[in-house]
Image (cartoon, rainbow, N blue to C red):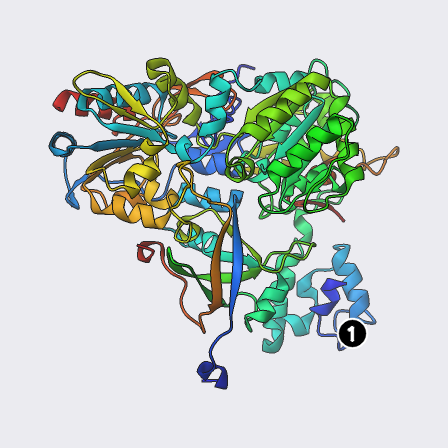
Amino acid sequence: MGFGQFLAAPEIKLKIVTYRDVFQNAAQESSRFGEEYEKLSAIIKLDPRDISRLSITENDTVIVKNSYGRVVVTAQRSGYEDAHPGIAYMVNSPWSNALVPDKTSGTGVPKFKDFEATAQSSKGGKVTGIREIF
Amino acid sequence: MEIYQFLPKTNCKECGKATCMAFAVDLLGRKAKVDDCPPLVNEAKYKANYEKLSEMITPVGDVTETGLIVHENKCIGCGNCVVACPVNVANDPFGAGSGKAPTSDKVIFMVENGIVKARNVQECRRFGENKILCVACIDTCPTKAIEFV
Amino acid sequence: MSRKYYVCTGCALLCDDIEVETDNDVVTTVHAACRKGVARMKGCSNPMECTVGGEKADIDSAISMAATILRDAKNPLIFGHGNSSSEAQKKSIGLAKKIGAYIDDTSSFCQGPIIEAILQDKLKTCTLDDIRHKADVIIFWGADPSNSHPRHLSRYSYFPRGQERQRGWEEDRTAITIDIRRSETADICGDTRFYQIPMGGDAEFMEALVSALSNKVPKTSFDFDKKRILELGNVLKKAKFGVICVGLGLVYSLEQLEPLFTLMNKLNEVSSFHLMPMVGQYNMRGFNQNLFVETGYINRLKFNAETGETEHGNNYSVVEVLRDMSVDAALIIGSDPLSSLPLSIARYLAEIPLITIDPCNNLTATRSTVTIPCALGGVESGGTAVRMDGVEIELKKIIETNNPSDEEILTRITEAM
């Protein structure tokens, strides 16, 4: 057990954008409850600087939460050339939907592609399973 | 070179090459196989690197005569290469050339089970006497699944 | 050589050039479909079982229990329909009318606003075939078809030869991506044809484009390079047949559609531009059109069982009626709302009696009192569906199944009421 265990993990604020991924979509067609679908869905893509700010390394799990929900997902580098600190990407899935606000300001359409959440290291926590999201 | 980073970098010459760098060049050109490096295969400390390299480098058996490789794990089956390939267009103008499923056996690319398959590669414009450096299939691929080595 | 082509129901492109090989009523090989389409046509690995109260049941008792739940409900909701045949959708609308239910579909939080404007003739549109034959300037706005509709570019919008586009994409077509991130589609369009805007900046970028098209200085609060906007304006002005493919990125970013109307009007003053909604599920547009024919609305309704009259509006959207907790039972068909709705809303849905009709087990099914497996549309049952551009496509059955079609199940529930 490392010393880091006793330190509070730094928490950062993020704006989250959701997107579509053909591999994840194909996995969904095969099985919503399959390992492949979880592996390709329960992820958050971050700017390398945000990964440093979180004091984690790639493929560590992070707690992403806001007043609507909380999930543990795997942190990955986004791979985008242009820097985007403070902006993170999640593929459209029950994991991202756990964090989408239900407010629609009267339009009936929630903001699926623009919402805020905080992230911090889960210190080795397990990724939230699809059945545990509820 | 990324490949070099995963080699032992000891220049042990067991592969028959003078240096690890020379071996890396051959790996890239598919003139050597990852398995030709005994330390990588046998020593436990290189296990992760061995797996990584094996994943990076498609075995030589899968490389077609023109050096064309399809990275099947990256291919999404969009068919952009099927429709953009000038040979496909010439040999099947109303099928592949018009965006539809190929209707001719003479096409180079066709999608099967969601992954593009290359065939008739001798027809590829990068092949034969009057070869040219055509990149139609590479430039149109959204996931960089096609490579020439 | 005669070939037998089937239709892929993986997305609303409804590709109709798919050959399949089968063995013992199992699809073994699929030709020409993309990775996502193949996954759909080969079927899921976890089919749904017929259950009542979590126990295996025969279909007769499941149907009778479904009818009981709907009969006992004061304010039932019928929702889903994105992955349902048009025949099933019409039965669904009939059932909602009969029992005085709320009815809505996934377009309610997807492409609904755009489809509505198209059906009301507020936006100029065209078919996918028009795009293949004529389009010379194609804009993907907040859309990444390489992931959502993998064959969009190869079948229609960029790479194919068409009647007026004989020379290939490099000479004949200009494809442009406007998005907040460099998607794989943006990569194909190339650096000079990619316009990266900040989150929520779509409306402002539209206004700037209108300025550019009006020979004014295009200003944005995010200081987008004016020269590049002017360049883009010039490309659009010269278009003979332009198309804007509208993705969810744009739909979610616009609070109202006015900026899009203004841009389209301006574009059609200076050149000719059409709009293509990038509809996701294979028959979402079908539901919108079927309900429109019946009621004049595309979604978000409540029927009055006695008078057959409808109440409609944003307050009748699936999101609002669940947030209000005004629904006390729901029939879900061709959709998995517990996966696709915001969790805080899905939580309420999970608490009320649910009936799920689908070929595959999904999150909604795990919380349902009744689950009834149906045939997989376009594979195990035929029917019709409406492509993203409004063209009706006939689905053909490929293999046999013991499961009834979605239409048949709804017919039986309606009869049991």
Residue sitting at 71 percent across and 43 percent down?
A: B64
Q: Nearer the viewer, residue C222 or A113?
A: C222
**Label 1: which residue?**
B13
User: In the picture, residue C46 is in which quadrant?
Assistant: top left
Q: Which of A129 and B124 is in front in this view?
A: A129
Q: Residue at x 59, y 30 (%)?
A: C259
Asked whether C135 or B9 is in front, the reply is C135
Residue type at tag 1? Lys
Q: Mark 1 lies on which chain?
A: B
Q: Closer to the camera, C217 or C12?
A: C217
Q: Where is residue B110 in the image (x, y as percent from the top left)?
A: 62, 31
State the residue at coordinates (39%, 30%).
C82
Name the image quarter holding the N terminus of chain B: bottom right
Q: x and y percent of residue A72 in the render?
A: 42, 62
Q: In this view, does A132 lie above or below B43?
A: above
Name the quadrant containing residue C353.
top left
Image x and y of residue C232, in percent: 75, 32
Residue lying furthest right: B130
Task: Tell me residue A19's x, y (percent).
Answer: 53, 45
Asked if A37 appears above or below B141 in the picture, the reply is below
Say whether residue B13 is visible. yes
Q: In this view, does B142 lie to the left or right of C277?
A: right
